[in-house]
Amino acid sequence: MSTFQAPKGTYDLIPPRSAKFLAVREAISAPLKNSGYGYIETPGFENVELFARGVGESTDIVSKEMYAFETKGGTKLALRPEGTASVLRAALEANLHKAGNLPVKLWYSGSYYRYERPQAGRYRHFSQVGAEAIGAEDPALDAELIILADQAYRTLGLREFRILLNSLGDKECRPVYRDALQGFLRELDLDEDTRRRIEINPLRVLDDKRADVQKQLVGAPMLRDYLCDACKAYHEEVRELLTAAGVAFEDDEKLVRGLDYYTRTTFEFVHDGLGSQSAVGGGGRYDGLSEMIGGPELPSVGWALGVDRTVLALEAEGIELELPASTSVFAVPLGEEARRVLFGIVTELRREGIATDFAFGGRGLKGAMKSANRSGARYTIVAGERDLGEGVVQIKNMESGEQSAVALGLVVEELRSRLSS
Ligand code: AMP
């Protein structure tokens, strides 16, 4: 061990487990790539104001958990705590919304940072794959995103997840509800912090996990009873489209989520094998966000799925992904000359697209064969002085143990044909 360790709340992705992370990222992004979403990458940090305005000053994410700092030049930046505000900022900056091709559909994958109290499934550095569909108000778009996330989880083999669905109303009906809720909450016996929250973002008080708060919330006005006709019809259509697609969901009228920008559709994917950090992903519609960050009116919808928690969910369900072995051929040279010759063959095989590795470091046959075994290679090529004298190498089938001599000039072709059968 070195003098240093990974910072608190972070961990390193190390082979072989890291392969699962790559596979999860791939599985989540595959349905998006297949549905018209283009890849976008934005910086790991942004102007701090973007998140203050975009995510919401009153949210825990911005007020408590953001890694904000000032550069030597005096610019106030923050490591990105989430993806949506950055992606929308980038889309607006590149005028993607003006290309006459709405919605602009984008997907991304990357690292996010929140100064949270670390625990199982909650880290200070984590990764998400996300999708945003910018510039269209269409229930089919909300449904599309939920269906694609469901498809991603199912392809991975996950079964024990549930989809929670709610509507948060729009700028017509939400303020009326907000007033009613504030009136109700102000009468309760709550601590200072919560009382402040009532004034800034009363909906989030509904999300309070404490039992004594939940007890007092019985009888609180529910948003469902305040939704305007347009919001009701919109939500009903999202629900119908999901049902028609065979995607099961649960209506959860308490689902408000920890970010201020959501309107209408909100949803969360929860996994029942994860304990307290059960949300594997979430998202919703954010019709007002563009204007909040200085852009035009651009109703949009998106989600972010947590890669770390998806891997934990796979492990909780005992799912082993079928990951192809990363090496097909392993070369074991015995002696100096064999090293030069086999290294040449290895290079040739790699240029042919055959995954090949080599016993480096001039190790003996026993140690090198151990590495060959560990690599998962289907074939090992072994050559010593005598083989080279005869102009051959030995190709060993690692599964059957069978070994045969193949002429030097034919090795690449022989392996190609054996691997493709
Ligand atoms: P949110 O932006 O909070 O809705 O997060 C979306 C998803 O990102 C969550 O459902 C988690 O899977 C993941 N996530 C958020 N915060 C963390 C964290 N601190 N550690 C690990 N995963 C996280």
Image (cartoon, rainbow, N blue to C red):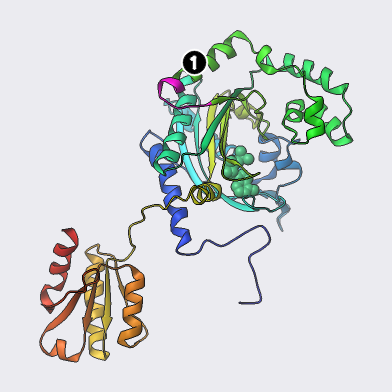
Residue 214: image location, x then y, percent = 77, 29
Magenta region: 242-249
Q: Amino acid at mark 1?
A: Glu
Q: Is mark 1 within 8 Å of ligand 1?
A: no
Residue 101 image position (x, y, % from top left)? 41, 26
Q: Quadrant of residue 241?
A: top left
Q: Relative to 394, is 36 above or below?
A: above
Picture quarter containing residue 334? bottom left
Q: Position of residue 50 (x, y in %)?
A: 66, 39
Instruction: Please give the residue where the numbered disc 1 appears in the rendered image.
Output: 237
247 drawn magenta:
yes
In the picture, residue 54 is in which quadrant? top right
Q: Is residue 71 left or right of residue 363?
A: right
* Horizontal relation, residue 113 to residue 355: left or right: right
Closer to the camera, 319 or 121?
319
Query: What secondary structure characterizes most of the magenta part?
Result: loop
Q: Is residue 281 visible?
A: yes
Was residue 420 drawn as part of the magenta stretch in this picture?
Answer: no
Q: Quadrant of ligand 1?
A: top right
Quadrant where the N terminus is found in the figure: bottom right
